[in-house]
Amino acid sequence: MRINCNTSVQGKLVVLVPYRTEHVPFYHKWMQDPHLQEATASEPLTMEEEYAMQRSWAEDEDKLTFIVLDRNRPDTPGTGFHGGAMAGDVNLFLTLGEEEGGRQAAEVEVMIAEEASRGKGLAKEALRLLMAYASRELGVKRYVAKIHEVNHPSQRLFEGLGFMEFRRYAIQLQSPNHLSCPPWAL
């Protein structure tokens, strides 16, 4: 989303910065991890596809993406000097139907990909910062999270933020394993 192309959001534990081309190689490396693929219901992309995805997200007015930096770790080499190491990402999607709130509602998701940054409260702070930013800048009033049923850490995280389960549904993934993954919709 263009609105955050020059935006940095500072927290005590994290800094949120726009997802830029210099982040793609490191992000691509994360997304080759089968555990992260399963937890995020993602399929691996080629490096070229990852760059195309980053460009499309930067231009899409319905998607807001920030890279989550861990302020307690040194900057990731090759990604600039932002005040912390790449730890994951946090995203917002303004593509919900009217039954889920339309343009005043958004789907949110977070991934802390770096093991050294997990379990330290980064995801919770990143989500709080993202939701505050989206409420202030975009007028979002309601948030939804769709979580894979095997992703228990994310379920606990969102419950700890006050989210409640309101629907379960099945999704058939188009993957070599043909997984069926019914996520939580919190």
Image: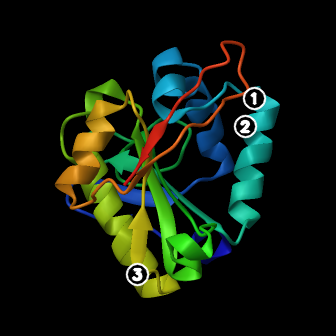
From the image, tell me which residue sits under label 2: 50
The part of the image, by quadrant, that contains residue 58 is bottom right
How far apart in space, not on screen, are marks 1 and 3 (Cα)?
A: 36 Å
Asked whether residue 147 appears in the rendered view, the answer is: yes
**Residue 116: x, y in percent?**
28, 27
The part of the image, by quadrant, that contains residue 65 is bottom right
**Residue 124: x, y in percent?**
25, 53
Task: Give the residue drawn at x 20%, y 35%.
Answer: 119
Task: Give the residue drawn at x 55%, y 73%.
Answer: 99
How far apart in space, not on screen, are marks 2 and 1 (Cα)?
A: 5 Å
From the image, tell me which residue sits under label 1: 47
- Left or right: residue 160 compared with residue 58: left
Classify 10 Å Cα crowding around label 2: few (below 14), some (14-19), many (20 and above): some
Q: Nearer the viewer, residue 24 or 41?
A: 41
Asked whether residue 10 appears in the rendered view, the answer is: no
Q: Amino acid at mark 3?
A: Lys
